């Protein structure tokens, strides 16, 4: 009978550990100021020649210990883009699904609670680096993008987003 009790205690301890780990992950995401729907503010944004957008938006949602980002944009040249990636802010490359102008993988690292750094690559070659900052009040997200896009155009853009 002690064997059954011992196994029950061990199972309970393991289950409690999993619950605590999951709760910690959920709490960490609850405090992530990037989570939400963001609409591009064209009036406050700046684009390098040939890389301007007529609209852009971003949805960031919780995905396990990380986030899933969905990006939609339309360029001046009429190109419509839709792409998605999921990352854990661990600096490891994650695949991009869709027609991203920056590349086919992204590696995201959290700098601090409101700031992150994303490194995009196309077929293993660095294209652009982005720094993202969410304002202290959580209402504005500013993304600075530098490098070269998949077409080889120089990119030095600042996209400003308003939280919806």
Image (spheres, rainbow, N blue to C red):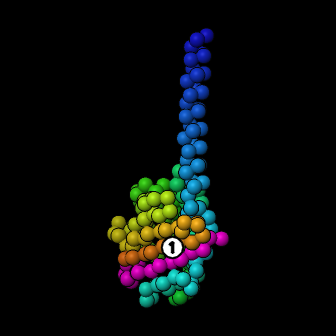
Toward the left, the furthest residue is: 125
Residue 143 position in % (x across, y down)? 48, 73
Residue shown at the point (60%, 16%) measured from the top left: 5
Q: In this view, does 155 lie above or below 2?
A: below
Nearest the viewer among 44 and 49 is 44
Residue shown at the point (56%, 45%) measured from the top left: 24
Q: In which quarter of the image is the N terminus?
A: top right
Nearest the viewer among 25 and 84 is 25
In magenta segment, residue 18:
no
Give the number of marks.
Answer: 1
Residue 11 position in % (x across, y down)? 58, 26
Q: Name the residue under label 1.
A: 142
Is residue 163 toward the left or the right of residue 77 in the image?
A: right
Element assignment for label 1: strand
Residue shown at the point (43%, 60%) measured from the top left: 111
Toward the front, the furthest residue is: 136
Give the magenta part as a residue range.
148-164
Looking at the rendering, which quadrant does residue 18 occupy?
top right
Nearest the viewer among 80 and 26 is 26
Residue 53 position in % (x across, y down)? 53, 84
Is residue 57 toward the left or the right of residue 92 in the image?
A: right
């Amino acid at each position: 009978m002690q064997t059954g009790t011992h196994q029950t205690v061990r199972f309970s301890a393991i289950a409690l550990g999993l619950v605590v780990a999951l709760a910690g992950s959920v709490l960490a995401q609850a405090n992530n100021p990037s989570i939400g729907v963001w609409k591009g503010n064209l009036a406050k944004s700046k684009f390098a020649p040939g890389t301007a957008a007529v609209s852009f938006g971003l949805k960031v949602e919780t995905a396990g210990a990380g986030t899933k980002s969905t990006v939609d944009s339309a360029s001046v040249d009429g190109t419509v883009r839709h792409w998605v990636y999921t990352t854990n802010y661990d600096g490891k490359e994650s695949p991009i699904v869709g027609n991203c102008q920056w590349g086919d993988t992204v590696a995201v690292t959290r700098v601090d609670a409101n700031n992150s750094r994303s490194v995009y690559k196309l077929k293993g070659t660095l294209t652009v680096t982005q720094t993202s900052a969410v304002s202290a009040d959580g209402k504005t997200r500013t993304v600075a993008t530098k490098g070269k896009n998949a077409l080889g155009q120089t990119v030095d853009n600042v996209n400003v987003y308003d939280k919806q």
